[in-house]
Image (tube, rainbow, N blue to C red):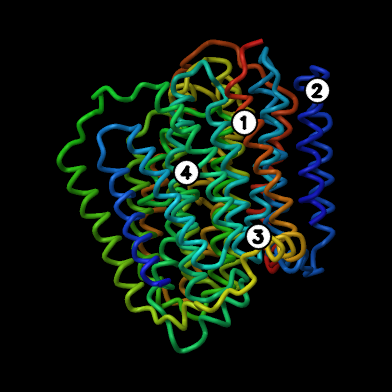
Amino acid sequence: MTALIILSLLGILVLMMGLFHLKNKVLILIIPVLIAGIFLNANEYGLNASYFSQMVHFDNFAISFSSLLILTTTLIFGLCLQQYKTSKKPVEDIYALIIFSLVGAICMVSFNNLIMFILGLEIMSVPLYVLAGSNRENVLSNEASLKYFLMGAFASAIVIFGMTLIFGATNSFQLDEIRNAVSGTKMPGVLQVGILLFIGGSLFKAAAVPFHFWAPDVYQGSPTVITAFMATVVKTAAFAGLFRFMMVAFQDISGLWVNILVIITIATLFLANFSALSQTDFKRLMAYSGISHAGYMLIAILVLNMNAADALFFYSVSYSLATIVAFGIFLTMKNATGEYSLEIFKGLSRKNPFLAFGLVIAFLSLAGIPPLAGFFGKYFIFTSAIKGGFLTVVIIAIINTMIGAYYYLKVLNMAFTKDVYHSAPVKNHLLLDAVIVFAAIGTLILGFFPGLLQGFI
Amino acid sequence: MILTTFYILSAIAIVCALMVVLSKNPVHSVLYLVTCFFAFSGHYILMNAQFLAVVNIIVYAGAIMVLFLFVVMMLNLNKQNQLDKSNVARLASVIGAGALLLIIVASVKSAELDILGVTQLGELGTVQAIGKELFSTYLLPFEISSVLLFSAIVGAILLGKKEI
């Protein structure tokens, strides 16, 4: 709860800093406050407290995930300096919107009342619609913003419609009261439709098939740091929110929706991995990679027990860290060459061994190769799924992991065996390097000591 | 009496909603939408939610729809410059929307009214009752929605401001 208040105030403060034309110096304020926010948030671990007539409930699940969200945002602010250092326009409003979006994401993982969920979803989305189009000279950015806004508004409407049907069936927005209401014998048909509409709308934000069509275009058009934010914070928040809702309210009646989620999971895995094979643009590749990771995270929602919650948390951490490393390296290379294609990584090992090493860690972790964090993320999810009785889904997911390894290794192959593509000098930035080093070391440590994050939730 | 009013209002709402989609002229669409909102307000009054009815008229039928009308008129959308959709896309959307309609109608039909919790709302819809709820039980959503509105304002300025 403290983090929620601090971050809301920080957003307003950052916006007011625009008065002094500090530009990127405002990061000196933002990053320490966010780090303080992580510690203050982690301080509430184990308190299990509800606030404001049980509108939000900061149990260990909420605390863990909101700490992860704040950490991810802090790392993304580290990338912001590289993106906006030459910007002549003020950047404070962009930074403030990122912080507001984070506030929404925290509401989404800590809600105990569906009103808070939908408010969190909207607070997270509305700044993102704007941020996607914040590069106004770029036509692709404008297109991304419009596309994201129209489809996102539609998805929100579907979530709200689902919520009203759930309310109609259970007469409450409060999660525990919904749980009590559905555990009775009578199950009205509107409840099932409501749950399905709710899942559909939430999966839109997480970009799972068949609600993924926006993702490649929006990821490609948005400014790179915003893409990184969407790929990590938004995806984590959407999954954590959906998991929390299903876990608390509908665990007892999983028969109503589990078959549909199985189909969605399998479709997501296959479609994303096969589409990713032919991508040549880095951001589109990351979009399809993100969709495929949504497929793995969906398995945790299928299983829906405390084991799966732990696995989902570990997976989110490993996925966020690796994605941030990848985007950080891409940002450096893009600023040096001015291009977006995968070709810019050619010959990276000779040009800049440091970045090449970071790329190896990030992509091997995303591909799920031991002993990196990504491998254990997948391992925990798969073991919890096998215990939960979803052996077929796990086998399909393992096949997809192998398909996925191809396109990750293809990029690494470019970086290590091909000739140098572009001779432009690569300027390393201290803050960006720090972010890459931190996230890469995090990935390594979690790979060697995966027990560190076990049993957190 | 209430039932007759309900059927009349529902008929108006459904016909107007259909006309919003079917009419060729976008200005007509917006006007039908305004009528549709008035019919909804009538429903709210039937359910004893006076505050919601008035707010619906002031905010939606009043402010937002007038804004909408201005935008439609300024963009001059009257010209027939819509892109033709392919027949496959049309067929797919008809099937998809039809299936959704079928499912929703079937589920609502099978729902029993007592489960839906339709009770006499009594004093629940008055300004006083809503104000009490808003500032006690729903205080946090009420406050946090200011973050939503604030970020929407900041976003509008960010997209709309002139280059400095």
Frontmost of labels 1 and 3 is 1
- Residue bearing mark 3: A450
The correct choice, above or below, for A420 with respect to B131 in the image is above
Chain letter of mark 1 equals B
Q: Residue at x 81, y 25 (%)?
A: A17
Q: Badges 2 and 3: C-beta atoms under 8 Å apart? A: no
Label 4 sits on a secondary structure element that is: helix
The correct choice, above or below, for B161 with respect to A292 in the image is above
Chain letter of mark 3 equals A
Left or right? Give the position of A316 relative to B85: right
Left or right? Give the position of A203 relative to B51: left
Other residues around mark 3 within 10 Å, as few (<14) / some (14–19) / many (≥20): some
Q: Badges 3 and 4: C-beta atoms under 8 Å apart? A: no
Label 1 sits on a secondary structure element that is: helix
Decide which of A266, A169 is in the foreground and name it: A169
Look at the image and tell me in which quarter the C terminus of chain A lies. Answer: bottom right
Question: CA gap, disc 1 to disc 4?
Answer: 16 Å
> Of marks 3 and 4, which one's residue comes earlier in the chain?
4
Q: Badges 1 and 4: C-beta atoms under 8 Å apart? A: no
